[in-house]
């Protein structure tokens, strides 16, 4: 179980959010909403272990998150900056991620899932923002992780790709993993827990 206890964050001594409490059990999906500037990205960065909260604690199975990450907890994070190297091809990007933190046997499935086979030898500098987002999402297939933290994953996706992402999220939750994402659009899974900031 992932648990947030009295989490507060601030910038320049001004609170972004205060005393946030919720928990997510295995198989859970949390959708974080709220207006721009309400702290959605900050919260997701805390949950991904990329920054520490100013107050409070995040725990995984009753262990501080940073300690769990130092042991064997694996988190897949996709933020606003999608971290695609534009000087590499689609395939080279996916191979890099798979070799670094995942499994190369999933590369073909990742390409197929996001319909990128015909672009695999294309430089990412030549791709549209929608295709670049699909390349970034391939990390979820190649480097699955136990917890997915996704910042606005539906941005720049067409309807068909959004549907495939929904299927991937649903299957991941049914596999007893945890997903926490921010979104300005409705997520169709009726079991999603909603957290609204601001």
Image (cartoon, rainbow, N blue to C red):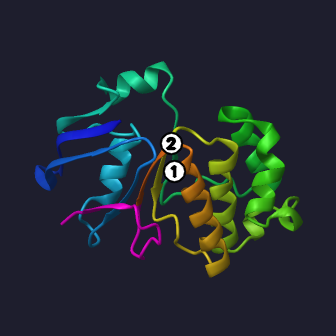
Q: Is residue 87 visible in this depiction of the protein?
A: yes
- How far apart marks 1 and 2 lie (CA) works out to 5 Å
Q: How many marks?
A: 2
- Look at the image and give the residue range highlighted in magenta: 182-198
- Looking at the image, residue 3 sits to the left or right of residue 20; the answer is right
Q: Nearer the viewer, residue 96 or 188?
A: 188
Does the magenta portion include 65?
A: no
- Looking at the image, residue 164 sits to the left or right of residue 71; the answer is right
Image position of 64 with respect to 147: above or below: above
Image position of 131 with respect to 69: above or below: below
Indicate the position of residue 190 as horizontal and vertical percent values: 41, 67
Which residue position is annotated with label 1?
173
Mark 1–mark 2 CB contact (< 8 Å): yes
Tag 2 secondary structure: loop
Q: Which mark is residue 176?
A: 2
Quadrant position of residue 134? bottom right
Q: Nearer the viewer, residue 187 or 149?
A: 187
Q: Is residue 88 visible in this depiction of the protein?
A: no
Q: Nearer the viewer, residue 12 or 28?
A: 28
For the point 44% across and 27% down, the residue is 69
Indicate the position of residue 162 as horizontal and vertical percent values: 59, 72
Mark 1 crowdedness (10 Å alpha carbons): few <14, some 14-19, many ≥20: some
Mark 2 crowdedness (10 Å alpha carbons): few <14, some 14-19, many ≥20: some
Q: Quadrant of the N terminus?
A: top left
Q: Which mark is residue 159?
A: none
């Amino acid at each position: 179980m992932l648990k947030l206890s009295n989490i507060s964050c601030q910038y320049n001594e001004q609170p972004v959010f205060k005393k946030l409490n919720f928990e997510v059990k295995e198989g859970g999906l949390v959708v974080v909403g709220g207006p721009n500037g309400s702290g959605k990205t900050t919260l997701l960065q805390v949950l991904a272990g990329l920054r520490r909260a100013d107050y409070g604690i995040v725990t995984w199975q009753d262990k501080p998150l940073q300690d769990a990450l130092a042991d064997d907890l694996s988190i897949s994070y996709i933020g606003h900056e999608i971290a695609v190297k534009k000087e590499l091809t689609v395939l080279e990007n996916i191979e890099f991620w798979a070799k670094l933190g995942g499994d190369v046997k999933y590369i073909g499935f990742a390409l197929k899932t996001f319909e990128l086979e015909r672009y695999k030898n294309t430089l990412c500098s030549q791709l549209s923002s929608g295709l670049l987002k699909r390349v970034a999402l391939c990390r979820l297939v190649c480097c699955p992780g136990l917890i997915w933290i996704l910042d606005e994953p539906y941005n720049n996706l067409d309807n068909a790709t959004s549907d495939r992402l929904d299927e991937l999220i649903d299957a991941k939750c049914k596999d007893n993993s945890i997903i926490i994402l921010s979104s300005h659009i409705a997520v169709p899974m009726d079991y999603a827990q909603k957290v609204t900031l601001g």
